[in-house]
Amino acid sequence: MTTNVQDTRGWPSPFANAAYQPDASSRRVRYGGLQVHNLRRQAATGSLAPSILQGLRAEERELPSLLLWNDQGLSLFNAVLDSADYYLANKEWALLRDEVQNIVGSISSGDRLVELGAGNMKKTALILHILQSQRKYIHYIACDVDRAALQRGLRNLQAIFPASVSSIRIQGLVATYEDCAAWLKRNPRSGHTSLMWLGNSMANFPPPEASEYIRSFLSTGASMIIALDGCQDHEQIARAYEGPSNQKFVLNGLRHANDVLDTDAFDMSNWSFLGRWNPELWMHESFYVAERDLTLTIGGETFTFRKGETIRSIRSGKWPKPKVVDICREAGGDVVDWWMNPDESYGKSAILLGYLAHALIDSLS
């Protein structure tokens, strides 16, 4: 379908805000005409190293899940997405395909649309295509922690939506979720901001932390469209999260930890993968498992592991609808609309600011 749209070259940049004074370590750069703003306050190695050591000192040992999302990790995760057992990708795509017109109905022309953890942006292209076909002018801002992957995804989008003829303006933020929330607070705008958090990414955090993240984003005045997985088939979940492609993805986190720490302390022959269901949190958890008794020396500290001892890598929540409602209300928001698969195992929730959401949800109850 061909859509005639006005030339948007005269649009102001969403970064051109006098109220925004970037941190000394942040910088704005252009790659082939793309504007990418680096909000990482420190180099990735500098910011992750203390978190790694803190996690190893903890009674319940855990490494930061950010270790999974370097350039190599994102490539490995794309292989996970292509796996026949990874049901989430197909279910989310089917839901987007069937409901995208309704899902984007809350996004108005002139809105700023920020995608958290943008990844390869294949789903994004569908959403932006529909917004453009509706003749809506959108500032799309992709947020991700890996600059190289972000640039690749943005270039692909730029080829589909060239600035000279498209109603979609495309830009990027190299940022963590915390960085992005802080940037949004420093950069208020007269128009509305919509946030997309797709791929069940919100459920990588335990419910209390997920609520805190939602609260931080809602406090910026934004509304949110969040994709969550409600699957309760534990065998299907195990096949999706414990297959060969997912094991490679998770174990790459140890290689990244070695790079961050400038060490070879994590010898890959000493570690294997373990996945299991945590019924208390409604979450699948992935772990690194010591294959033998180990003593690691990192940064002058000594860490011992007995054979079979674990380090948690990442979690993925599988929350039913009532649990999602509780998490959102704890954050000060309410679910005001749902789009579900026919089997109701994968849905998206649109969350508005607390007072707006309460008014809408009350009118439906």
Image (cartoon, rainbow, N blue to C red):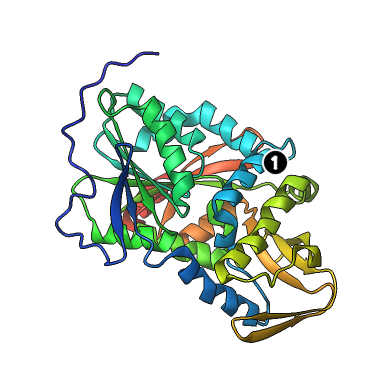
Q: Nearer the viewer, residue 80 or 348?
A: 80
Who is closer to the viewer here, 271 or 125?
A: 271
Asked whether residue 177 is in view, the answer is yes
Residue 336 in view in this figure: no
Q: Residue at x 78, y 67 (%)?
A: 289
Q: Residue at x 46, y 55 (%)?
A: 145
Q: Amino acid at mark 1?
A: Tyr
Local crowd size for mark 1, using a 10 Å CA cut-off: few (<14), some (14–19), many (≥20) = many
Which quadrant would residue 156 be assigned to in this image? top left
Quadrant of the snapshot with the N terminus = top left
Q: Is residue 342 above or below residue 320?
A: above
Tell me which corner region of the image, top left, top right, bottom left or bottom right, holds residue 62.
bottom right
Q: Is residue 202 left or right of residue 244?
A: left
Task: Tell me where residue 328 appears, x and y as whole percent.
Answer: 47, 58
Q: Where residue 214 sits in the image (x, y, percent)?
A: 44, 59
Label 1 sits on residue: 86
Q: Relative to residue 287, is residue 173 depicted above or below?
A: above
What is the secondary structure assignment of the residue under circle 1? loop
Q: How many marks?
A: 1
Residue 216 screen position, x and y as percent? 38, 63
Q: In the image, what residue occupies the spot 74% across and 67% down?
A: 267
- The x, y position of residue 158, in whole percent, is 37, 31
Choose between 42 and 319: the one closer to the eye. 42
Give the answer, above or below, for where 355 lies relative to 159.
Answer: below
In the rendered structure, the answer to whether residue 109 lies left or right of residue 362 reads left
| Residue drawn at (20%, 63%) of the image | 21
